[in-house]
Image (spheres, grey):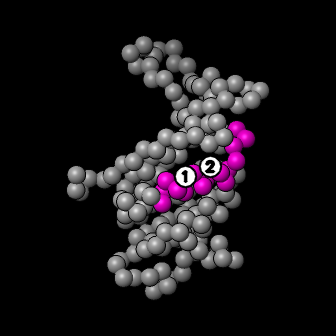
Amino acid sequence: MPGMPSIERHAFKVDGFDYVLVLREAGQITLALTGGHIPGRGHLFDLYREHDPFEKWEDYVPGIELFDDIDTGVNAFRLMRAVQGRMNGWINRARPSYFVIAPNSTRKATVYNRATALLARRIRGYQCQQIDQRFYFFRLATGATGQAHGTNDAREAADA
């Protein structure tokens, strides 16, 4: 429907773990770990599901969504490649006016620095600005280039 924000939900697996990537035109991008098994520790559902003694059976929703930084042993760069491919497709289809990519831990920050630099090189018509640990991608006006509106920090970081 024209004028309505587009929302895409992508479910995929990397290294035996289940992920959900939610892309909203309003600039919100969410990646959640939803399932898998950590060797020697158990299934994520058993490890991270919070038990609510007052939960009614009809309110029970099976599954979990983890946003925290937990050490699962997943190859972070393989995961970021899977996410990047889905984001590239979404950007080309939805053409959001802006979106933000931000790590929620210092351990993820180095991976996000590299991944956003690669993303900035691959998408056209967007300018990337880094403020603290957040990366803001803004769609440029038709016919404008990144050089005309200043530098693209993420691209320069990737070329360095």
Q: CA distance from mark 2 to mark 1?
A: 6 Å
Q: Is residue 13 left or right of residue 139?
A: right
**Magenta stretch: helix, strand or loop mostly:** helix
Quarter of the rendering containing residue 115: bottom right
Q: Is residue 76 magenta?
A: yes
Q: Say whether residue 66 is visible.
A: no
Q: Nearer the viewer, residue 14 or 53?
A: 14
Q: Is residue 138 left or right of residue 119?
A: left
- The reply to whether dot 2 and dot 1 touch (C-beta < 8 Å) is yes
Question: Residue reaching furthest bottom?
Answer: 148
- Residue extent of the magenta highlight: 71-88
Task: Please name the amino acid that badge 1 sits on.
Answer: Val
Residue topped by disc 2 = 79
Q: Residues within 10 Å of mark 2 (few under 14, many from 20)?
A: some
Residue topped by disc 1 = 83
Q: Nearer the viewer, residue 116 or 28?
A: 116
Which percent across, then down, holds residue 97? 37, 65
Asked if residue 140 is positioned above or below residue 96 in the image, the reply reads below
Which percent across, then down, holds residue 149? 45, 83
The residue at the point 51 percent across, 14 percent down is 53
The residue at the point 48 percent across, 60 percent down is 88
